[in-house]
Amino acid sequence: MTFSIKKSFKDSWSIFTSKKFYLPFILVSFVAIIGLYIVFGASGFLSTVLLLRGLWWVMIPLLALFLFLGVYFILVNINLSLVAYKTKEVHFKKSFSSVWNFKLIAKTTGLLLLVGGGALIIGYLLSLGLSKIHPILGISAFIVWVAYVAVRLAFSVYILVDSKETIINSMKKSHTMMKGNGWKFLLFIICVSILSAVVQIITSRIGFISPILSEIVVIIFGIALAPWFSLLTVSPYLQLKSH
């Protein structure tokens, strides 16, 4: 059971270039990303204000609300890619209403905290122990452990959203799907990262003419190519699931 990197690029590009699909995807993705930026920006600003005023007891429920909304917008983007890839269609209203579900948002929040927090805590303890032997050994162990968890559980959120699984089952199934595919998936991520970096370098060359124009072009290209990169990253999961 494996996936094809070539097929991931080919299929995602085919869907991406569909005229019927492109503009609705851009609109939903843009609104979700803007919503995410507003949520994180507002949470940082209001947290600072409340701390300065000594109103920490107000800050805790407020941060919980911002976390809830932040995960919601993340879910919009994830579900958008899954649905678009499978149906080749995007519906603006449905893209937002389909994931406005307290249980789903709470489960996703728990999964992200468990995977992220668990990886960092265990990685830190591992690094702390091995650093006594040599600092480089400790740092290397931390990086390897976090990368291992990131690859092995990369599909956890997709499974949770797509199959409505529990947090633990989502992690187990992601781990199973990645057996024999870890290095290949890591290579896939490196390819996508290099491609993204090349696009940014090319568009930023306009900075020699005007820094402001360069920033505008980078943003425009980032928004314009967002559907493709979203579809590209979800493709390996759907290929493995189909097996």
Image (tube, grey):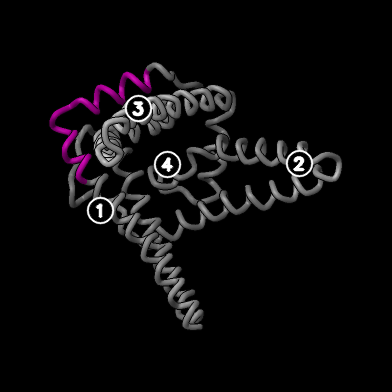
Q: Tell which tag, 2 or 4, sits nearer the viewer.
A: 2
**Residue 199 marker:** 3
Q: Earlier in the sequence, mark 2 or mark 1?
A: 1
**Residue 158 marker:** 4
Percent position (x, y) of residue 60?
49, 74
**Residue 96 marker:** 1
Q: Earlier in the sequence, mark 2 or mark 4?
A: 2
> Could you tell me if the residues under marks 2 and 1 are in contact, i.e. CB atoms within 8 Å?
no
Magenta residues, start to end: 7-27
The structure residue drawn at horizontal position 49% and vertical position 26%, both measured from the top left corner, is: 190
> Could you tell me if the residues under marks 1 and 3 are in contact, i.e. CB atoms within 8 Å?
no
Task: Give the Cα separation between the discs numbered 3 and 2.
Answer: 34 Å
> Could you tell me if the residues under marks 2 and 4 are in contact, i.e. CB atoms within 8 Å?
no
The structure residue drawn at horizontal position 46% and vertical position 48%, both measured from the top left corner, is: 165
- Residue identified by numbered label 2: 138
Q: What is the residue that sits farthest to the front in this orientation? A: 209
Compare residues 228 and 214 and report the one nearer the observer: 214
**Residue 84 marker:** none
Classify mark 4: helix, strand or loop.
Answer: helix
Residue 178: image quadrant is top right
> Could you tell me if the residues under marks 3 and 2 are in contact, i.e. CB atoms within 8 Å?
no
197 displayed left or right of 203: right
Classify mark 1: helix, strand or loop.
Answer: helix
220 displayed left or right of 180: left
